[in-house]
Amino acid sequence: MNVVEAARQAARRALESTYEGVCAVTENREVTDERTGLSDQEEVTVCEGVPCRLSFEKQAAAGQTDTAASLTQGVKLFLAPETRIKPGSRVTVTQNGMTAEYAASGEPAVYSTHQEILLELFRGWA
C-alpha cells in the first residue's frame, strides 16, 4: 500500500468515527403486476442500517413575507462513498435518539473517503 492510499484509509476511518446515526433509504419504483400487466408505484427499501452523520447548518434569520415568517435550515448527510442514494429517495435517519424523514435533494458529492448529500424534509412522493 502506498503512502497516499494509507492516508486516504486513515482519513476515511477518522470520518467514519464521527458517524453517530444510521439511515434507511426508500425509493418509489414503478412495478408491473405480472398477472394483470398493470403498473403501479411501490415503496422499496434499498438499504437500511447504514452508518451516517447528519450535519445542520446554522439557521438563517427568519424571512418575512406578507403572510408569515419562514425559517430555512441546511441539512447534509455524510456516509460511505459506496452507498448509492438516488435523488428523490426518502432517507430515514436516526441520530441522537431522534428519527426524521428526509428527501435526497440532488446528486451526491462523492469523494474517496465519503459522500455528502443535501437533504430536505420529506413531504411525500412527487
Image (tube, rainbow, N blue to C red):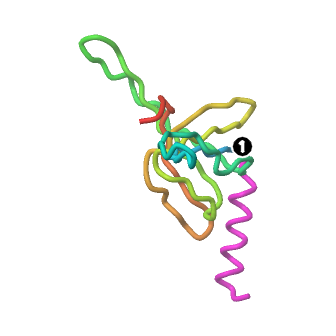
Q: In the image, residue 4 lies at what x, y percent?
A: 64, 83
Tell me where residue 26 sits by quadrant. top right
Q: Is residue 117 magenta?
A: no
Residue plotted at (75% across, 30% down): 97
Residue 58 percent location from the top left of the image: 49, 35
Tell me if residue 115 comes above or below residue 97 in the rendering. Answer: below
Q: Which residue is mark 1?
A: 21
The residue at the point 70 percent across, 29 percent down is 98
Give the farthest residue toward the front. 35
* Residue under the image location 48 percent in, 30 percent down: 124
The quadrant in which the N terminus is found is: bottom right
| The residue stretch that appears in magenta | 1-21
* Residue 49 spot, x, y in % from top left: 74, 47
Q: Residue furthest bottom?
A: 2
- Taking the image as shown, residue 1 lies to the left or right of residue 26, namely right
Q: Is residue 64 above or below residue 101?
A: above
Quick check: 111 left or right of 82?
left
Q: Is residue 37 found left or right of 7 in the rendered image?
A: left
Q: Amino acid at mark 1?
A: Gly
